[in-house]
Image (spheres, helix red, strand yellow):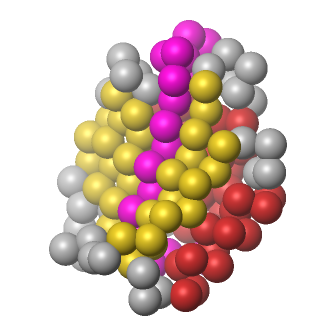
Amino acid sequence: MSVNIEASIKTPAINMSETDGSISIKGISIPEDPHEFYGPLIQAISEYKTTPAERTALNLHLEYFNTSSTLIIRNLIKELHGIKTKTELVVNWFFESDDEDMKEAGEEFALLFADIKFNVTPVDSFA
């Protein structure tokens, strides 16, 4: 099941391809109802877990996210954590090089999921 959701002012773009195992979340995540917004992705990951690709990459390019999105992101990584024996799992957390808060958030997630390959990588800009 592929997922393609366009970005809005309050929500990130989400793209998932089960064939190549890529999941990408880009933008700002402050949805009114995060469970409703992220529902299609959570459902797709649930289905994907039965027969994942050889390699699975979660690529997070978040400029900002609120507390409720933090819980969703944690739950997404936790869902993927369950398939790490079936696939080579990597989480790539990208942050703008001058954004210490987003860097720290990525580092905190990396500590929380220390047994997953977790890259926290600065970029010049998301623009």
Residue toward you, 13 or 57: 57
57 inside magenta stretch: yes
Picture quarter with the C terminus: bottom left
Residue at (23, 68) in percent of width and height: 8
Residue at (61, 32) in percent of width and height: 89
Q: How many marks?
A: 0
14 left or right, relative to 33: left
Q: Visible in this render: residue 48?
A: no
Residue at (67, 16) in percent of width and height: 86
123 inside magenta stretch: no
**Which stretch appears magenta?**
49-68
Q: Visible in this render: residue 114?
A: yes
Residue at (73, 69) in percent of width and height: 108
Q: Residue 85: x and y, percent?
A: 74, 20
Q: Residue 102: x and y, percent?
A: 53, 78
Q: Residue 116: x and y, percent?
A: 72, 42
Picture quarter with the N terminus: top left
Residue toward you, 32 or 2: 2
Up the image or down, 4 lies above or below 17; here it is below
Q: Where, by quadrant of the figure, is residue 125 drawn?
A: bottom left
Q: Residue 65: x and y, percent?
A: 49, 75
30 left or right, relative to 26: right
55 left or right, relative to 87: left
